Amino acid sequence: MGYFNSMKILGIGLENPYRNKIQKTNNYAGQYGRQTVTRPYALDSVSFGRVAENAEAMRRMFKYGVIDINTGQYCIDPEWFTKILQNGLFNRSIQSIVKVIKPISDRLHKVEAELFAKIEEISKVNPLYRLDNVIQMLAPKAQRELRNIQRPIFDKLKSLSYKLPPEQKAAFDELMAKTENQLENKPITYKFSKKEFRYKLERISQDIKRRGINDEIKTMTKLINMSERIPYTPSGRNFSHKKAKFNPDKSIIQANMIRQMDNYFSRSVLKDDKSLKDLLSDAKMQIFNIPMVIPFARKTFRHELQTITDTLKDKKLAREFSRISKELPTAEQEVSAFVMKSSNYSSVKIGHDLLYGSVGDIDHLEPWSHGGADSPENYAFTTHCSNEKRGNKVISRWLKENPETIEGSQKSIDRLIELYRQGAFAKEEFSPWYIINFARRMEKLAGKEYDLHFDLGVLPQELKRK
């Protein structure tokens, strides 16, 4: 089932007026994003993080199937991703989801592809399950697998902790006691932090904005505005209920504001959103220091460990703690970590995260923070996951850590030349000189150490490098 059939299931573009203009090649026949040129739908794209300016023509190229320079895989079209979110695909049964996602499943990154394969298998037996049902089914086994990976790493950290001074050793032991409770699903006391609450609220808001439903966006804006009136308390966690500080006056004001938000939320279009429900419910328990079960979070653990090691005079020891803690698996590295991270998510959030990392994005070759320009000459086709992973690393350093980018860049160039021959560049008014400029710029930024020379031998004569 191809791209347009997927759109039919969703009720998107039921009759495509350009269908008769599509001519499939033998190499790409029947696969989404690999047909030759047809005009794309009007762009209603996902957020690109820090928006790459002057890149409208590049973004339109995602319609035709472009390749991530870092992975060498085809990118999922951002417009298509936005439309399936807006049409509520992930609120449907996994049978419906599999039918739509299957044609683009080869674009998924490794962990997401493995999870999708599990979802597809389960759909054959339980086709009416929702995504959250699937995650709950997979969670017990995933938890055991993840713990088997995590525990040797925690053991290394514990062995290293005997080199800590007494004050830091006591703080580390307290952190590990809390972590052990989390790993065993035991309740802990978690101090309310307005900063952390607003951070999580903003993350939920970002997901909702990508769905593009105005009433939902207005509701989130209202909730965020209401949250500004919550008074601040010092950030951090209390690992012992007895040590938890309680300010009656401030806590009552915080609780009243959370209650007002909850009342507004319960009457809104988002009243069934599980992420918001859980966030508001947890906030009430945190304010009054009620012990609660909180899943282990790698990012939170590493942050709390760093607050301990930052006070060390022995910076080499601090770096060793950081190095070992980095070995804890992420949701981008292990299916079990992805499942456990998603275990309390709604079906919509799970579906979003399943695809989002593989959705097309535009990256600065020379990072903007290093003075790189906001112009097509400094842009590359990539995915959200690759873009976030690279951060602001310069190309020469990135290639040392990710040499596969060289091969991926060549695949991206080959695909762009193919699209030029098919007429996509002309239809989108995107300069074909981008291909040469990209190759030259990558070669220059890689430096003498790599001495890159991308193969442009199949480039049409009119664009041959002089």
Image (cartoon, helix red, strand yellow):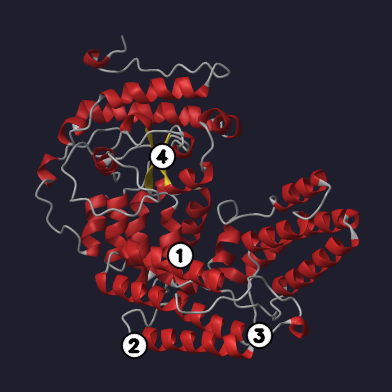
Q: In this picture, is 394 found above or below 153?
A: above
Is residue 1 in sight in this rendering?
no
- Mark nearest the camera among 4 and 3 is 3
- At 55% across and 16% down in the image, what residue appears? 448
The amino acid type, in three-letter code, at marker 4 is Asp
- In terms of secondary structure, where does tag 4 sit? strand
Specify the quadrant that holds the C terminus.
top left
Corner quadrant of residue 265:
bottom left
Q: Which residue is mark 1?
A: 203
> Alpha-carbon distance for marks 4 and 1?
21 Å
Q: Which residue is mark 4?
A: 363
How crowded pointer 3 is (Cα within 10 Å; few <14, some 14-19, many 20+) is rated as many
**For the residues carrying marks 1 and 3, which lies nearer the camera in this image?**
3
> Element under label 3?
loop
Residue named by callout 3: 289
- Give the CA distance from mark 1 to mark 3: 24 Å
- Give the amino acid at mark 2: Arg
Identify the residue position indicated by label 2 in the image: 267
Q: Nearer the viewer, residue 9 or 192?
A: 192
Tell me the number on the disc at residue 320: none
